[in-house]
Image: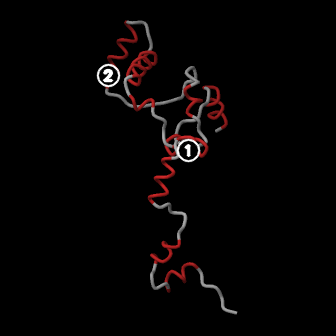
Amino acid sequence: MAKKKSDLQSLLTDTDGIKGVLREESEIPKKEEVEVRASQGLKNEEANSMVNENEYIQSPDLYLPFSTAMRADLYLKLKRIEYWNRTTIKRELERLIEDFVDTQTASKKPLPVEERNKLKQLKTAKDYIKLRLKK
């Protein structure tokens, strides 16, 4: 009884080399298959995604930790506004961002599944504190 060749041995002795193996790969979708999947719409994508954008839209009172960097001059100006207008930087940034996203049509388009799965999890501040305490 002949011993079965390993995948590596079959690659080394294959006259087509790696092209022969790649031709056999059925997992790689063809261009037409990708176009058909794209034309099936968002419903199939939502079924494949573990994240539902509606949960984010319906949670305007839930705050997610988010950090960024800004120019020093802008930070100083925001601190001045915060002090003299008796407000908070958080409140002013939210107001500015809301005004901005309302003018952008892209803010109304749903994210592709790959990007949607990268969204921060919906957690309360208490959830994040519990995670920190466990470490």
Q: At x 52% / y 43%, what residue is drawn?
A: 41
Q: For the residues carrying marks 2 and 1, which lies nearer the camera in this image?
A: 1
| Nearer to me, 93 or 3 | 3
For label 2, count other residues whose C-alpha is less than 10 Å away and answer few (under 14), some (14-19) or many (20+). Answer: few
Give the vertical position of 110 relative to 59 (above or below): below
Specify the quadrant of the image occupied by residue 67: top left
Percent of width and height locating residue 44: 57, 45
Label 2: element kind: helix
Q: Amino acid at mark 2?
A: Leu
- Quadrant location of the N terminus in the rendered image: bottom right
Task: Report the residue marked by disc 2.
Answer: 74
Alpha carbon distance from label 2 to label 1: 40 Å
| Nearer to me, 26 or 63 | 26
Q: Is residue 127 left or right of residue 88?
A: right
Label 1: element kind: helix
For the view shown, which residue lies furthest in the right direction? 1
Task: Report the residue marked by disc 1.
Answer: 45
| Nearer to me, 28 or 51 | 28
Q: In the image, which disc is placed on residue 128?
A: none
Q: Amino acid at mark 1?
A: Glu
